């Protein structure tokens, strides 16, 4: 296999390397501008109990992952990152890490794009990959920067790509991985190329199993259930609707009166889960059936953008 040829570009006191330095077309440039100005927060529950914006937490998470990858000590936890940045701005004399090292993750999180008239535009990895939905966020990170995937995200991505319920033609594990002699949650370059160039994702089925904007804990449980069912030679049950269920869940509108009229707690739970299943099916029909929703369009646009990005020069 021929070695990859990189083209070096200096921009804004930083060096970037391109595999494919091609100008973005008008649609790609418009999509990039959209990613830089929109966070796609589709619900109002976008803050934690500490009132921290979830997009801020995603930025901290990626800084933490780069810091761990580059072995930057004392800058790996959210607390350390925030503390270091506060010291950098307000109390530089107390900072125990040099400025260049502290700001190194920024270089790795910047992506450079060639736009019209031989101009360039910088986009950040958090803005390119952010989505309130865990599944979509994982897929986007795999597209733009797969080496920053967590162990579980890699496991999730592989679970999606190798199973026929989620893709038209499942990815076939090769070499030692197919023999179970390496960790199954390792995502290879070949797998990423498959994701970008060959796969056709079944969004309806993906959200049927994992739910819409489900939490990481629920998704982990679903991955375990899927793998267990496969081991037993069974087809797992698509229970994504349960991602919205808690012991305090109550139906909306006219269904509330029916639910309140039920005396038995077990029957109330059955009614509530049935209601959530119906609501989830309505959401799937509206957003995920062919001709509806924007998941596939955004996925393809992200793939196209990733193929024209420039990365920090010493990244690979």
Image (cartoon, rainbow, N blue to C red):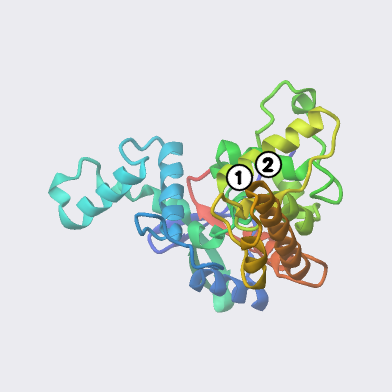
The part of the image, by quadrant, that contains residue 161 is top right
Check whether the beta carbons of the residues at disc 1 and disc 2 lie within 8 A of each other.
yes
Q: Does 91 sit above or below residue 31?
A: above
Query: Depth check: 232 or 195 in front?
Result: 232
As helix, strand or loop, the secondary structure at mark 2 comes to helix
- Tell me the residue that label 1 is attached to: 218
| Relative to 8, residue 186 above or below | above
Secondary structure beneath disc 1?
helix
Q: Nearer the viewer, residue 305 or 53?
A: 53
Residue drawn at x 55%, y 59% as measured from the top left: 132
Instruction: Work out whether 76 lies above or below 273.
Output: above
Q: In which quadrant of the rendered image does the N terminus lie?
A: top right
Residue 74, horizontal then vertical, whole percent: 30, 37
Q: Is residue 261 visible?
A: yes
In the image, taking residue 275 as reference, residue 103 lies left or right, namely left
- Depth check: give the residue in front, 53 or 217: 217
- Taking 10 as reference, is 161 left or right? right
Give the tally of numbered discs: 2
Q: In the image, what residue occupies the spot 62% across and 49% down?
A: 265
The label shown at residue 201 is none
Q: Left or right of 208: which side holds 256?
A: left
Instruction: State the image coordinates of residue 104 (x, y, percent, origin top left).
Output: 37, 48
- Disc 2 target residue: 222
Q: Position of residue 289 (x, y in %)?
A: 80, 66
Q: Would you place residue 21 above or below residue 225 in this image? A: below
Task: For marks 1 and 2, give the CA distance.
Answer: 6 Å
Image coordinates of residue 236 in percent, x first then y, are: 79, 40
């Amino acid at each position: 296999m021929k070695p990859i040829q990189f083209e070096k570009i200096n921009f804004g006191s930083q060096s970037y390397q391109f595999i494919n330095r091609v100008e973005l077309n008008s649609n790609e440039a418009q999509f990039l501008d959209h990613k830089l100005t929109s966070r796609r927060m589709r619900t109002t529950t976008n803050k934690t109990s500490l009132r921290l914006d979830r997009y801020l937490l995603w930025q901290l998470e990626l800084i933490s992952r780069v810091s761990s990858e580059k072995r930057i000590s004392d800058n790996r936890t959210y607390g350390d990152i925030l503390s270091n940045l506060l010291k950098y701005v307000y109390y530089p004399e107390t900072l125990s890490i040099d400025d260049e090292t502290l700001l190194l993750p920024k270089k790795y999180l910047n992506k450079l794009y060639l736009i019209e008239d031989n101009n360039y535009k910088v986009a950040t990895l958090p803005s390119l990959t952010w989505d309130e939905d865990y599944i979509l966020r994982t897929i986007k990170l795999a597209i733009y920067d797969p080496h920053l995937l967590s162990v579980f995200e890699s496991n999730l991505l592989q679970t999606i790509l190798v199973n026929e319920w989620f893709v038209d033609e499942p990815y076939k594990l090769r070499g030692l991985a197919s023999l179970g002699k390496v960790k199954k949650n390792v995502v290879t370059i070949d797998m990423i190329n498959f994701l970008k160039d060959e796969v056709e994702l079944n969004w309806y089925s993906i959200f049927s199993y994992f739910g819409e904007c489900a939490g990481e804990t629920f998704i982990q449980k679903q991955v375990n259930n899927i793998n267990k069912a496969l081991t037993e030679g069974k087809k797992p049950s698509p229970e994504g609707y349960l991602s919205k269920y808690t012991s305090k869940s109550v139906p909306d509108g006219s269904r509330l009166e029916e639910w309140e009229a039920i005396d038995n707690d077990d029957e109330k739970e059955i009614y509530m889960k049935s209601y959530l299943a119906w609501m989830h099916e309505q959401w799937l029909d509206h957003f995920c059936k062919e001709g509806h929703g924007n998941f596939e369009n955004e996925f393809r646009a992200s793939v196209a953008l990733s193929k024209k990005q420039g990365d920090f020069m010493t990244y690979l």
